[in-house]
Amino acid sequence: MEQKNKVVGRPVRKKDAMRLLLGKPAYLEDVTPSDCLVVKVLRSPHAHAVIREINTTVAGKVPGVVGIYTWQDVPQKRYAQAGQTYPEPSPYDRLILDRRVRFVGDAVAIVAAENEKAADKALKLIKVQYDVQPAVLDFHTAKDNPVLVHPEEDWKACCPVGADNTRNLCACGSESDGDVDSVLADCDMVVEHTYHTKAFQQAMMETFRTYTELDPYGRLHVISSTQIVFHVRRILSHALDIPVSRIHVEKPRIGGGFGAKQTVVAEVYPAFVTLKTGRPARMIYTRRECQIAGSPRHEMEIHVRVGASKEGRIRAMDVYTLSNTGAYGEHGPTTVGLSGHKSIPLYTGGLEAFRFAYDVVYTNQQAAGAYRGYGATQGIFAVESAVNELADKLGIDPVQLRLRNMVREGQVMPAYYNEKTLACALDRCMLRCADLFDWEHRRTPRVQPDGKIRAAGVAMAMQGSGISGVDVGSATIKLDDQGCYSLTIGAADMGTGCDTILAQMAAECMDCSVDDVAVFGADTDASPYDSGSYASSTTYVTGKAVEKACAELKTKICSLAAEMLGCEASDLEFAGREVRRLDGGGAVSLADIATRSMCGTAPAMQATCSHSSPTSPPPFMVGMAEIELDPETGSVRPLEFVAVVDCGTPINPNLARIQTEGGLVQGIGMTLYENVTTNALGQIAENSFMQYKLPTRQDMGTLHVEFEPSYEPTGPFGAKSIGEIVINTPSPAIAHAIHSATGVWHRELPITPEKVLLGLHHKQQD
Amino acid sequence: MLTIREYVRPQTLEEAYTLCQKKSSVVLGGMLWLRMQNSQVGTAIDLCELGLNHIEETPDDYVIGAMVSLRQLEQHPGLAALTQGAMAEAVKHIVGVQFRNLATVGGSLYGRFGFSDVLTLFLALDARVELYHAGMMSLADFIGMPRQQRDILVRVYLPRAPRRVVYLSQRNSATDFPTLTCAIARQNGQTCCVIGARPMRAMAFDDEKGLLAAGVNETSAAAFAKDLAARVPLGSNLRAGEEYRRLVCEALVRRGLVQMEGC
Amino acid sequence: MEIKLNLNGRAITAQADPDTLLLDFVRAQGCVSVKRGCDTANCGLCTVLLDGVPVLSCSVLAARADGHSVQTLEGLQSEAEEFVTFIADQGADQCGFCNPGFVMNTIALLRENPDPTDEEIRAYLAGNLCRCSGYDGQLRGIRAYLNSKKEQGGARDGAEK
């Protein structure tokens, strides 16, 4: 199956690397004019309130203030901000500004001013009288709470996701295979625990930001730091109640996304201002706004029951997830699914029965969104921790327990839409990782001379590659003068390097160098439709579209060459820089074909192809962590993290490695340092990087990443995805290591030194 | 948001002092905390032209100008020798090099921040401060004064008399605020132990019960640490609770004493 | 108020408010490599050299820089160029938004300590956050750069100084 590749599989430098590293203008604030209107949003100080009155008279008189808009000024048509394929599973529960505000930080008014100082001054002078309402802050009590987050009658769910606003339900559902209760009853050992993960922030270095203006045609031109240009266009059309034909969306370089920019967080505000004033406008979120009114991970509490025979055969798994979508339902109905679909199937091996049920509830907290891992991260922390607890109770090495039960190539996964693994190297990942890490020796905790304890933990993970039957990837490839190519895409490179990766695929197909392929995207006016860069879809889905488009262009090139050489296309061979007759009777250079295509000939030397996959082949990986734990202070220092990843064919090993390393450190961050605490008023304490502690380079130890390739027949060049899976293993592996060191299981993230020390202390007192 | 109406670089301390008598005036330190505040400053007084960014030596003291940066403290060989490395240990976990290049000694002490590593160590070193108007006083007396005084902290004096010093801190992550700080100094058989980030401002404790009178060893260190941890007023904040701090306090004090004696 | 300073070797005179931050001042002067990442002096994205010393331009008043020399990555292109190719070769540039601050502080590190250990690199750059790369690729890049400098031999180093 595997073929010899020239460009694919090579560590090609990112096309934009040098310009980015040298600080050239590339991002939204660098490339849009600064003399536009500054847009700012007044945010609610209350978790739940109804606006009785807003007085903007004084604020409106501040010199430089151009407009102040309130709920009375905006279209009264509810929409969803989640960047998803239409009709969105996320409920239509938003207005640009609503009379009811639903979390601390919810938008109350929009200010447009000539400069930042005037905007800030106006924000302070807007007088709002609130009728403060009781708030739903505890997500355990949200379902069927008498206080409704969305009592409005025009609330609407477009898809049958079990949503019911009269019960504070954004979604609910269940699925099962076999009789989980009776199999569990028959198991020698059942482990049953509840695991809790918080609303962690993507914390991409560039905050949300959007620039808008009217173009010469009077259309709304939107430049936004977004992963989803086409969804932004459609969502703005819904929110602003103007036709899609009047909107043009493009993205510049993006300073990180991780899913945050798969939600239309900032776009509506400047877009609304530009429509109202006719003037260019720009909104740049402060870091504080990002932290309190962004689109973080869904907080989840996951109840796991896992049953096994005493020999260590995992027979049944029962997972119930309670997910907190916050004040609005963005990605609520879909993230929750992954908490079961990407955790239970890891144990397809001998699983006789499973059940997965969930409720997604509205609360008066910051609305959640999409964050790398998208629910799988939460589910895998729970299920992998439960399996480690099971191994501990059974007295079986957790690596061996996994090898006995894990999903293997060729198996049908009942808990994953009955998909069959066509490419699965999870077993090899486990063996290789155990070998690299020296699991056999390091799994036993060792007390150091200074009293600190070194201990190890393990976890495995899966994810998907795009959304099966939904995501659409597209590419246009065009033959240019001198025989080079333009590749136009609608997927968004947010730093991942997908522009380069897709160019590598095109170069492989067209037998040329990566430098011969110019990449452009993403722009709704110019790019072919692509659902956007999310759900680990770009390499797998858009990559396949590139492959298809290249094949079609090659056919077109050959038919023009046939015309030039006076033969049939079937007599020709495409050889990269030229097309030649198979019989050796002549050739024509690609440059000449390009020249010819631009003079007196009809067929366009351009091909556009789309791709959508009926399956979403999971990448797999294994992670092992070694920590050093100080039993007198509770400090946990990550020493080393070893990860072995099966992403199919790594198209660009350098970029795949960096994706992995970046994901691991984010995973370490949510496990040990990043916290989200909300007080009784619903205010988030960690509203800055001073309080929300991202791991620094002194907090993560060393990383060791290897790939254990498989070949996914439905993917381009055998590739699956890499973007999301990489965040999933640190939390269960580190929690496992902490248990090894202390004998205490921590089932809530983050695991702070305080929790570790008090856990140890209370255990010793018992 | 911080707004400033006027920015001034006084050429004399007298000028600076006069300017700072107005309620809306602020003396700039490193600007790191000030800049995060939501305040309207009338006159921002920058002491940058008063030659206060040097560390000087007199026969008795290191004299540290108020505008000396934390990075200067970290890299100063004399202070390293005086404190057996504790000076660098006290500041090197503070955010990052760029931050420490801005943060000033004057700003750190004048703010009397609860989380201050610098305050913790300087209290243990018997530091004195020179205020333009109020004159010389011990750092301990200074931090006991109300914050609203409109005076200018000019210099800090660290006695050069030799002493054993150790500094330890506990943090949730490498460059975060501390959840507890501990500086211990021992001179002529007298031990001073300062605990900061309680999370309230640092407090100094002596060996009143003479637990270390017979010398510092594993046993006496443990006894002193246990006794001290039981009586230090501690509290809770976002980063850690009182119970945790008490356990950590005992561990750091004991370790600090043992480490100090080992050097 | 009027601010006079030397920006990347060029004498600048410009108007600014007393509370204008150096970050906004240099961006207005076209030095857009300098980025704002946090507002709380925690991320390092806004790192510039003030009289050769790396500082956070988000926490320096433009007024304070009056009479001083400020360098941004725009002014250190040739010093940065060779080094950053090694970061590019790791793919560690990623989204790139933190890169200028990271490159500026690495330049400051290497001027101060031309042969740092991995621990010294991590400590010096601890105030430069990166959310994409996981840091190890940046470290490998710096290490590869230093190794290549060593391979080039000491003769040229001597000549440069």
Image (tube, coloured by chain):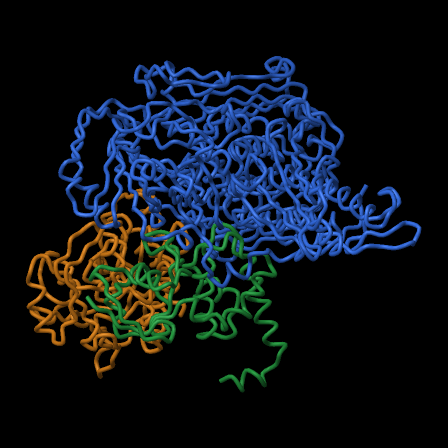
Q: Give whichever of A99, A616 is nearer the camera.
A: A99
Chain A, hue in figure: blue
Q: Is residue A431 visible?
A: no
Q: How many marks?
A: 0
| The residue positioned farthest toward the front in the image shown | A600
Q: Which chain is green?
A: C
Q: Give whichever of C148, B222 is nearer the camera.
A: C148
In percent of width and height, residue B37 lies at 22, 51
Residue at x 73%, y 37% (from the top left corner): A712
Question: Is C153 on the left or on the right of A99, as rendered?
Answer: right
Residue at x 50%, y 38% (from the top left corner): A228
Q: Quick check: A376 above or below C123?
A: above
Q: Which chain is orange?
A: B
In percent of width and height, residue A595 lies at 71, 54
Q: Quick check: A475 above or below C11?
A: above
Question: Is A594 on the left or on the right of A374, as rendered?
Answer: right
